[in-house]
Image: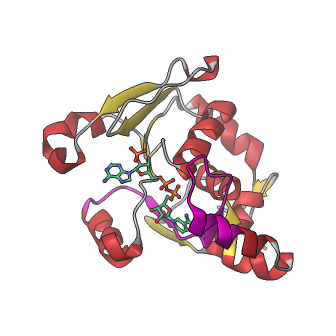
């Protein structure tokens, strides 16, 4: 049987390393929930948002969050915003048609990170702040399906975010990991132990 590590211990070990993190797309649905969870779990000693506009937060929990505003059309001019972080999460909104999923992943590979993970969720289930009637209809549809079928094709954003964080705190010898919707469900639901 594969060896498992207790998640609370992994989180504690991770916290002790005082790592810094940047988040791209923190104004979007996934990024917003990810930021909230990162602050709640106190996983990083420094949190920086990189986006095309400054965000406003009222809650006290966000008071130490740093922000860098960059022009995504001229990223070479903003290289310093991306330097000096231990971990980065990209939650930028795009569509497969616009970006080409394979193309994005190939470009990420070229960057030669020590380690990176690609999350490929099904339909994201969330209470989106912004109104998107098409997505609302799709979510209603999935909400009406039997749980076992719906979970094969969709996933709550909170589960995706927990999977991203559980993956980050778990040391891995693998340089690259691909997580499909099923793997995201499994990892995001884990609350006691993980397989490295
Ligand atoms: N929704 C789904 O069911 C689903 C399913 C599978 C995969 N995904 C993928 O998961 C990712 C996140 O989805 P999401 O629903 O959380 O996204 P979202 O709510 O649409 O958030 C989009 C984020 O990306 C930023 N952004 C978009 N275009 C940008 C640009 N040209 N330059 C700079 N920033 C830009 C937005 O910033 P502003 O606030 O400034 O606009 C926002 O922070 C997307 O790549 C999506 O394709 C989504």
Whether residue 100 appears in this view of the structure is: no
- In the image, 8: left or right of 64? right
- Which quadrant of the structure image shows residue 48? top left
- Farthest bottom residue? 149
What residue is shown at x 18% (from left), y 50% (from top)?
A: 73
Q: Is residue 95 visible?
A: yes
Q: Is residue 137 left or right of residue 31?
A: right
Residue at (51% x, 19% y) in the render:
64
Residue at 31% x, 63% y: name it. 108
Q: Nearer the viewer, residue 182 or 75?
A: 75
Q: Quadrant of residue 140?
A: bottom right
The magenta-colored residue range is: 111-139
On the image, the x and y values in percent for residue 110 come to 25, 65
* Numbered-mark total: 0
The quarter of the picture where the C terminus appears is bottom right
- 15 vs 161: above or below: above
Q: Is residue 133 magenta?
A: yes
Where is residue 23? Give x, y as percent: 44, 42
Q: Does 80 sit left or right of 28 as displayed?
A: left
Residue 137: where, in percent of width, then height?
66, 70
Where residue 147 sits: x, y (%)? Answer: 84, 75
Q: Who is closer to the viewer here, 70 or 119?
A: 70
* Ligand 1 shown in quarter: bottom left
Query: Going 52% across and 26% down the picture, which residue do you hit?
Result: 45
Above-or-below relation of 58 to 136 = above
Between 172 and 25, the residue placed more toward the observer is 25
Does 139 appear above or below 158? below
């Amino acid at each position: 049987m594969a060896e498992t590590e207790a998640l609370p211990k992994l989180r504690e070990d991770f916290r002790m390393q005082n790592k810094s993190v940047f988040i791209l797309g923190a104004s979007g649905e996934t990024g917003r929930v990810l930021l909230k969870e990162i602050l709640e779990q106190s996983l990083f000693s420094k949190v920086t948002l990189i986006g095309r506009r400054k965000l406003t937060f009222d809650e006290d929990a966000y008071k130490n969050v740093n922000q860098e505003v960059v022009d995504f059309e001229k990223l070479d001019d903003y290289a310093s915003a991306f330097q000096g972080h231990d971990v980065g999460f990209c939650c930028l909104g795009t569509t497969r048609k616009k970006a080409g999923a394979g193309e994005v992943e190939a470009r990420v590979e070229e960057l030669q990170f020590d380690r990176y993970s690609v999350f490929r969720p099904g339909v994201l289930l969330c209470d989106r702040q912004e109104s998107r009637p098409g997505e609302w209809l799709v979510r209603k549809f999935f909400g009406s399906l039997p749980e076992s079928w719906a979970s094969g094709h969709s996933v709550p954003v909170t589960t995706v975010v927990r999977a991203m964080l559980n993956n980050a705190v778990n040391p891995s010898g693998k340089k690259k990991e691909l997580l499909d919707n099923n793997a995201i469900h499994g990892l995001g639901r884990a609350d006691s132990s993980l397989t490295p």
